[in-house]
């Protein structure tokens, strides 16, 4: 806070003196008028000395009282206004310099409004610092995720340059390069989608459509996978269920849930998909008899880049469920997960029908 100069103090003081001298003078005049009128009414003879004495006492009284009030008000202002303002401005300066760990401690004698401001600033810095952590974590995660496929591509690219490679090995190396490139491309697509969803650059294009048909069509895309892995499919999809939603965004949800169910279910397992309705909602369940997950893993699965099961890490990038959650949030729906290690997992999605 700025320090007052001697000149400013003198200027303030002279303004104060002029103001209260005038007030004291006016009040004294009024008092004299009142006293002489009142004395006239009750036929009381007042001498000039009486009047002069009363005028002086009134004048001095007003000056003294105003001085006392001004001093006590100044002290009150210092405690309840100047101090919190100083703490707030000091904190704001630190925030401007990028220190988001700053928290202002509320004091019991701060004026009430400052308590609210302090609470808001503390909330704001907390939000900003968690955003900052998310941002730095995101950059660290992206860089890490980019490095692995790039390193694979670089290594196999170098190996491919050897002239004496057999045809079989060359095809194997080339496949490793293209697999990594595909992984990289899929990760970039997911990052872009997630980014656009989070920045609200995607506005849901809602239209009424047949959800039953969409679920069947999405599921059929995985036919090769369930046949190759010998996974049984069990469906209980109610016919003709329509919803008013963004079909493209919701297909992203089903594709991610189905691909996870197949990814985490071993040969001989079962993946079940059901669709039922209540008066206002469509309820979709994607159930598998796969590896399941612990409650600790379950608590993080909707976070970006989180992969609970690292044995399948190369088949994903930990962004699938983050995308699913974002889409469901945009649709104002709900997604829940129940899982038991070694027994399987059930994802339940509930979305409004109209
Ligand atoms: P990824 O594409 O890497 O699988 P996701 O965001 O789709 O990323 O999933 C995050 C994590 O959630 C997975 O690494 C896994 O641990 C867990 N998970 C998701 N679906 C299932 C499932 N059906 N069964 C068991 N674990 C699952």
Image (tube, rainbow, N blue to C red):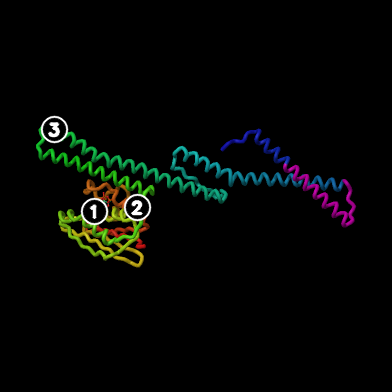
The residue at which mark 3 appears reads as 162
Q: Quadrant of residue 67?
A: top right
Q: Quadrant of residue 16?
A: top right
Q: For the residue with label 1, is its CB less than 8 Å from the closest atom of ligand 1?
A: yes
Residue at image coords 21%, 57%: 220
Q: For the residue with label 3, is its CB less than 8 Å from the closest atom of ligand 1?
A: no
Residue at image coords 40%, 45%: 131
Above or below, 128 relative to 265: above
Measured as percent of width and height from the top left, residue 25 is found at: 78, 44
Residue at image coords 22%, 63%: 235
Above or below, 138 relative to 255: above
Q: For the residue with label 2, is its CB less than 8 Å from the closest atom of ligand 1?
A: no
Q: Along the line of sight, which residue is nearer the eye, 274 or 242?
A: 242
Q: Earlier in the sequence, mark 2 or mark 3?
A: 3
Can residue 41 be found in the magenta stretch? yes
Q: Quadrant of residue 168?
A: top left
Residue 259 is labelled as 1
Measured as percent of width and height from the top left, residue 184 is found at: 25, 42
Answer left or right for 179 relative to 83: left
Q: What range is drawn magenta here?
A: 19-48
Query: CB atoms at circles 2 and 1 under 8 Å apart?
Result: no
Helix or strand or loop: what does disc 3 sit on?
loop
**Distance Cα–Cα, label 3 vs label 1:** 37 Å
């Amino acid at each position: 806070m700025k320090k007052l100069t001697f000149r400013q103090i003198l200027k303030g003081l002279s303004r104060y003196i002029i103001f209260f001298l005038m007030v004291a003078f006016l009040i004294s005049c009024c008092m004299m008028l009142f006293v002489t009128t009142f004395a006239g009414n009750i036929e009381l003879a007042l001498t000039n000395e009486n009047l002069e004495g009363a005028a002086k006492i009134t004048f001095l009284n007003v000056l003294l009282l105003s001085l006392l009030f001004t001093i006590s008000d100044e002290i009150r202002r210092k405690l309840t206004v100047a101090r919190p303002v100083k703490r707030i401005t000091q904190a704001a300066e630190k925030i401007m310099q990028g220190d988001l760990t700053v928290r202002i401690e509320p004091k019991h004698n701060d004026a009430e409004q400052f308590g609210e401001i302090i609470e808001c600033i503390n909330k704001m810095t907390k939000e900003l610092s968690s955003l900052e952590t998310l941002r730095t974590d995101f950059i660290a995660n992206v860089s890490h995720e980019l490095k692995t496929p790039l390193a694979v591509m670089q290594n196999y690219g170098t190996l491919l340059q050897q002239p004496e490679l057999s045809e079989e090995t060359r095809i194997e190396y080339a496949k490793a390069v293209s697999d990594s490139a595909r992984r990289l491309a899929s990760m970039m697509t997911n990052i872009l989608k997630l980014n656009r969803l989070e920045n609200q650059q995607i506005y849901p294009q809602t239209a009424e459509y047949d959800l039953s048909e969409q679920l069947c069509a999405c599921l059929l895309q995985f036919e090769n996978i369930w046949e190759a892995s010998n996974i049984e499919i069990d469906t209980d999809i109610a016919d003709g269920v329509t919803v008013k939603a963004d079909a493209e965004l919701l297909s992203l949800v089903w594709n991610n849930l189905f691909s996870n169910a197949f990814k985490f279910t071993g040969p001989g397992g079962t993946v079940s998909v059901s669709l039922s309705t209540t008066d206002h909602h469509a309820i979709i369940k994607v159930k598998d008899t796969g590896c399941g997950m612990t409650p600790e893993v379950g608590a993080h699965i909707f976070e970006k880049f989180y992969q609970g099961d690292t044995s399948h890490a190369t088949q994903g990038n930990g962004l699938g469920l983050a995308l699913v959650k974002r889409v469901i949030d945009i649709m104002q729906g709900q997604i829940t997960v129940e899982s038991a290690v070694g027994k399987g997992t059930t994802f339940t999605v509930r979305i409004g029908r109209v």
